Amino acid sequence: MEKHFLSQYVSGKQKFMAEPWYNRCGDCIVYKTVDVAVVSNRIDEVLTIYESLKTGDSIGFKIKGVNGIVSKFGYDGLMIKSKQKGIIVQSISVTALLLAAYETGPMNIKRRQAYAGVLSSPQRPVLEIPIDSLQACT
């Protein structure tokens, strides 16, 4: 089998980590709970839900236009401050971001059910994105 051209920079078995990450150039937050093939179900211009191709279960989501939502609602309504190793860490609550995103769109049952499903997912832990990672793509 042919070696991957980046294999010299990676060693050991790769481990999937279920944590949200902010894509600076896409201005979006992506979160998947498992590393499986997905079908993307676009709910509106902000929220896309990822469903397992095999089972159809909801396994993650993408929130677009993060900086626009932050600009509209401000950090005060979305921020979480916590102390880690003696340092004050400021992050954005992904739950608060989802609630703010819901408020910006049309009120209909499909959107309500989709946002409620993402917010009430039993395997979804408290998710945060550090404020200093929300820098625009240059």
Image (cartoon, rainbow, N blue to C red):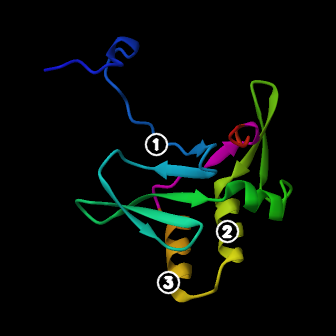
**Farthest residue toward the bottom?**
108
Residue 126 visible from this viewpoint: no
Sooner in the amino-acid sequence: mark 3 or mark 1: 1
Q: Residue 72 carries which label?
A: none
Q: In which quarter of the image is residue 132?
A: top right
Left or right of 7, for residue 136: right
Which residue position is annotated with label 3? Answer: 110
Marks 3/1 in contact by CB < 8 Å: the verdict is no
Which residue is tagged 1?
18
Residue at 36% x, 19% y: name it: 6
Residue 73 in view here: yes
Give the label, 1 or 2, closer to the camera: 2
Question: Is residue 71 depicted above or below 25 in this figure?
Answer: below
Which region of the structure is painted magenta?
Answer: 122-132
Q: Which residue is drawn at 79% across and 51% down?
A: 79
Q: Label 1, secondary structure: give it.
A: loop
**Amino acid marked by disc 3:** Lys
Q: Residue 101 carries which label?
A: 2
Q: Indicate the position of residue 91 as horizontal and vertical percent values.
A: 74, 44
* C-alpha span from label 2 to label 3: 15 Å
SS state under label 3: helix
Image check: 121 left or right of 102?
left
Q: Does the magenta stretch include residue 126?
A: yes
